[in-house]
Each structure stands twice: as structure tokens, then as C-alpha cells.
Amino acid sequence: MSTEISNELKQEVKALGKKTFHMGGVHPEANKIAHNQGIEEFPLPDQAVVYMTQHLGAPAKPVVQKGDKVKVGQLVGEASGFVSANIHSPISGTVNRVDMIADISGYKKPAIVIDREGDEWMEDIDTTPDIVRDIKLGKDEIIARMKDKGIVGLGGACFPTHIKYMLKPEQKCEFLIINAAECEPYISTDNRMAIEHAEECIIGIEAALIASGADQAIIGIEDNKPEATASLVAAAKGHSKIKVQPLRIKYPQGAEKQLIKAITGRSVPNGALPISVGCIVNNLTTTYAIYQAVQKNMPIVQTFTTVSGKSVPADQCRNFHMRLGTPIQAVMDTVGIPEDTGKIISGGPMMGKAITNLNAYAVKGMSSLLFIREKDAKRGPISNCIRCGKCVEACPMGLEPYRLHALSENLRFEDCEKEGIMNCIECGCCQFTCPANRPLLDNVRIGKNKTGAMIRARAAQNQSK
Amino acid sequence: MSILLTVDTAFLLGILWKAVLILGIVGIVAAIVLFFIAKKFHVEEDPRIDLICELLPGANCGGCGFAGCRNLAETMVARGTMDGCSCPGTPKEKNEQIAAILGIEAADSTPKVAVVRCQGSCENSPAKVSYDSEISCFFANSLYAGEGLCPNGCLGCGDCVKACNFGAITIDPTTKLPVVDEEKCVGCGVCAKTCPRTVIEIRHKGPKNRRVYVACNNKEKGAVAMKNCKAACIGCGKCAKVCPFEAITVENNLAYIDFTKCKMCKKCVAECPKNAIVAVNFPAPVAKPAEKPAEKDETKAEATTPAEA
């Protein structure tokens, strides 16, 4: 399902040029098998399990109990704490129980189990397909709406979006950067979003511009998405504050700091947030969710998920739109798990999580389910560091992964701190490129964890003095 | 030879006594200067620190919570007590000598040993997923529940082995569980602190090196626990009911034996339906003597009518 792009549009896109970041990066196979598959609605599940931990920060607190009747979009989990988000019911029916249910890691998390009855939405939600173009809300109302409707970063990290817009008086946002890079292999949801829902996204971006007070918004999109780029350029016409910037294909083009550097040329200082250089970054799908929240009063109750894999027949690799809490086993069975599957990943092959427990349920920001072949999934035998320096070349943050790995292994956490281990964005470029198959990122992650704990303990000690 | 004899011996002796005198004076002056310097820059240190240091194991394992054995010795002398600053790995006799040096009563230090509270071997808790990297239990713990899917069980990556300064713990390749060498283990506690799941516990070594403990750390409900592991404690509470010394408590679906109250009668071991309680270093059970069944029959016969017996 790919449409022809007019020559005029092609010329416009070409004139925009291409930008990129220059330090580090790798080029994994793109494998964008599901690129041309239109988004399909996945059938409603008969029972949905809604975890209270679908975002970064404190888990939400359940506000319903066994026997309660709920409608779609009704608040079932309340944000608890500053960094937390609301969770809304994805289906209508009766609450079966509030229990501890294992997620993809095998660890149990608090969750609400709902038995479906029909598909009744809350009355104040606009469920019509018409696009609402006029934005009637002001800055503070939009931010409140983001918080109220449980909007979180749908690029994968699920950071509560409203917090990014709550600026201190001395902070000023100059650029709103929209991340449509989708640099991870296989994933195609942002691509389809740009093709099929470009107008809604643009309206969402206008709302975000009001909320941030930014002068302009720039959508960064990788060069392997010509149809999506053209679609966004066409939709942005008439919106003088919104521009599209094509980017070169390189992983991790979609990483926050790399994206800001590529588009604005500014470097976010170590340990600082994007706002310190006047930028706020949001994923393209998040802007669609912002549109739905601001214009349709709709909370996040669904997720866009690509199901793909090299052994899956190309026409079976699909992009689903499913309700939260849908059993992922059902999703995988619809596509069919290939015989030679060794690993199933939630997210991308570079930064995603390998699924340990298949009896888990769809969550916010579950951008893909990937079937990786056994032979691709098996790690090679680990040999000694050959001091080739490829990891240093590949690191987009300018770190020395071989050294951080060694320091971490030998428990030298003060040295880890000095060498900047806390600046690691855990992109995986180092481990991807290492010819000796050394588990670089694994050890750096352990090092980050222990160094972080050491820094916090020190800060606590200093405070008590 | 004759040439030497003709050398003027008086001349030689003249040089000799001058050399000896000069060197002697230099030596004495140096000695006096050094004596005063040594006195001025002398570091006042309690001689007991060295004495105590010699009695400590010298492994600098950190089990005491201080920065090495010398630091512990300094702390003991500074505080004048062994309360809160004692070495768990020092044998009783040496502890008594240390107490004598400090001039205090030796605290009652029961020898301790590390105990692995998990029987989730490859056989009991078969792997449902395969973890492709044996880096670290700490890391695996943060990623997923475990190959056997028990969220409280041993992960088998060997962080405890790396942490032990005495080489007392190893991973058995068939069961993939840690095994503690009782001869080498001093009960310092570093392995217990390292284990991210608190599977390892430091317990009393016990009289004749015998001890009884619940070899499970699982806090899931019984039915779930059984799915993950054949040897899991299901929290049924039978052991707690049968214990004559009230040493067993069941909390969070897991039984725990308080080693200060346990008298090692082993009633709980027999009672446990999952064989989750382990008794270490006991002699093999002796076969029951033949009279007992006959006695039972006699008493039964007395109580019931002859027709029923």
C-alpha cells in the first residue's frame, strides 16, 4: 500500500537537504519489512490486563476494585507522585480483580483485570473519525490535558509527557523537535503514522507548540521513509511554524541528544536535559496522542505495534492498532510464530527487551513484537578485547566502551564516574560492533547502576552533614 | 713477604687508629641524631593493634564492615570493645586471645556458615527460557525472573563465587546452584550481601556442624511456586505446626526457621510435603527396630475388640 508521490513534492523534499550527527553511530540492517502495511485494527480482547507500571516513575494506584463497571477511557489508575501517569481502561466491562500479574520479564506487577462487555466509551470522549482542526485550549489547559489523559512518550521510554512542558520561569523553549526518525530496525509504526495520520499529528504539534511556547517545530525523519516525508511536508503546508527536516540513515539518529545535534547543531551538556539548550523532544506518535487528548478528550487506551521478523512472510508482517491489555500471545498467534524463532523482542533489536514470559499483555509504547531467528539471536563466543577501537569509533556519546566495561568488571566505580559512564545512553552501538563479541553494554549497564547508587549515597551523605 | 715486613708498622697503625676514630665518631653522632629524630617523629601507636592484627585472618574480606583487618584492629583498640566490631571469620580461641589483649570478657561468638536457601536446580526448576550471557546475577536479576521463572530463586551466574575471598563457594555445574565448602567458609557474610536475591543466609554452624534450614526463598503462592519448581516451599505451614520449640514462622508463603530457637529435632524435615527443609551433616537414619510394630499391635488389640485386630 504505497502511493505515488508527485514530482513537485519530491523536489520540495530534496530541497530540504539532509542532516545528521557526526560522532559515532552504526548501520544495522533496516529490515523495514512492514513499511508498506497499512495500520489494521486488532480485534478487541475478551479480557484485558492493565498493568499499573506502563510509564517511567512511580506505578499508578488502582482506583477501581473487583466488581466495578468501567467504560472505555475511564480512569482506573491514578498517578502517584511527581513522575507518574494516569492509566485509563481500554475496554468496557466489569473489573474481574486487582492482582499481581507477571509482565514480559516474568516479574509480577500490580494490574487490573477487566472482563469485556461491549465497547462503551465515556460520554465526554469524541469517538468520531472527523478531524478537529481548531485548537480551543490555552497553554496551561493543554499541559493539564496531557497529564489528565495519561500521555507518555510513545517512542518507547514512556516518560510522562506533561513534565517536559512544565518549565521553570528561567527556562525558554526555542525548538520543539519531533522525533520521526524511527532508527531502530523493523519498527514501522511512526512511518505509517506519518502516512496515514499526518494531519492529526500536525494538529498535535500545534498544540505542543502552544504548550511549550516554542518559536518553531522541526520534524526529524530518516531518509528511508520517502512516502512519510512527503506526507508530512504536504500536511505541514500552511503551518508556518512547522518544518520537516530529512535525516541521514544512521543509528541512533532518533536518540534525543543526537537528534538535537543533527537538527539544531546544539550539544546538550553532560547530565543536563534538552531544555538547557532550549529544546523539547517528543515522538511523532506521542503528538498523535496529544491531538487525541486535546481535540477529542481521549486518553491513551491503544497502542500501535509492528509485528515482524525475517522468517515471517513479508505480507504477514503487520502494523496493528490494539487496545492496551490485549494478550500478546493472541497477537503473535494471529501472525504465527515462525518455527526457527529463537528470541521474541518487545521493542527494537538494539534497545528492546527480550520476552521471558509470553503470557503478558500490551502496554503503552509497545512499538513492536519481533521474531528473531535462533541463528541471529545466539551470541557468538566471547573472546578477549583485541584493542581495535571500533567501540570507541561507534559510541555516539564519545565514550570509551572497552575501558568502561573493564573498569566496571573490576568494580572501579569512582573511575567509571570520572570516565563519564553516566553519560551512556545505552544505545548498544558498542556491543553491536565489537568483533570479539564482548558484552560491552551489559557491563556498562551494571557499572551505571552501581555508579549511580554510589553517587546517590554520596549525595545523601553530603546532605546529612 | 719480606717487603711487607719491611713496611713501617708504626705508620700503618697511625693511619688505622685515625680512621677508626673518625668513623667511630661519625657513627656515634649519626646514632645520636637519629635517636632524637626517631623520638621527635615517633608515631604513637598502641602496640595492641599489631598484636590483634596478627590474630585476625588477614584476608581483608570486609565481612566485619571495616576497611580491612588492620582497620578493624584499630577500631577495636580505639573503642575498647568487640561489640559491633568483631571478625566473624576468627575462630573462638583467637577471639578469646583478642579479648584478653583488650582486657575484656570474650563475647560469645558462635561459629557461622553460609547457607544456600534454594534447591532450584536444573532438574527441580527446569529452564523455560535460556539466558544467553553469564555475566552477573546482579544484571540478570534486573532483567528477568530467572531461567526457571522463579522470581526469588538462585540465578546461577556466580556473583557469590566472585565475591568470596576465601574460595569457599563454587557453582555445581550439574545443578547450577552454589555449593559452600564448610571447611573454608568463615561466615564473613560477603556472599550474602552480594546475592541480589538474598538466597544466601549466614546461619549458626550448629553443634557438630549440624543445621536445619528451609532451602527455599520463594514468596509466591503455593500453586504458582509449584509450577516453577518441584522443591518449592508452598507456605502450607505444616512445619510450623509440628515444631515443638516454636522456631518456625511462615510469612509471605515462605517458612523460616529461627536458628537461635531450633533444637534440631528434625520433626519439620519429615513433615514437609515438598522436602523443602534440609538437614545438614546428620547421620543417615537408622532402621527402626522390629519390636516397635509388634508393641503397636498389642496396644491396638487391647483397645479394640479381638475381632477387629
Image (cartoon, coloured by chain):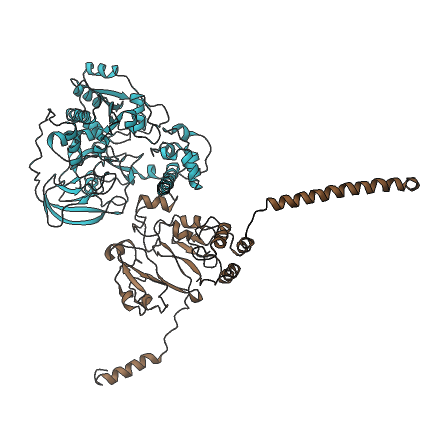
Q: Nearer the viewer, residue B26 or A149?
A: B26
Up-down: is A206 above or below A346? above
User: Is residue A317 visible to the viewer in this orientation of the structure?
Assistant: no
Up-down: is A420 above or below A116? above
Q: Quadrant of residue A39?
A: top left
Q: Quadrant of residue A252?
A: top left
Chain in brown colour:
B
Q: Going by the image, does A24 lie left or right of A4? A: right
**Which residue occupies 10% across, 24% down?**
A134
- Give percent across and percent down for residue A58: 24, 42
Q: Going by the image, does B44 lie left or right of B121? A: right
- Give percent across and percent down for residue B292: 33, 79
- Give percent across and percent down for residue A215: 22, 21
Up-down: is B207 above or below A51? below
Q: Nearer the viewer, residue B7 or A114?
A: B7
Q: Quadrant of residue A146?
A: top left
- Give percent across and percent down for residue A16: 25, 16
Chain in cyan colour:
A
User: Is residue B192 visible to the viewer in this orientation of the structure?
Assistant: yes
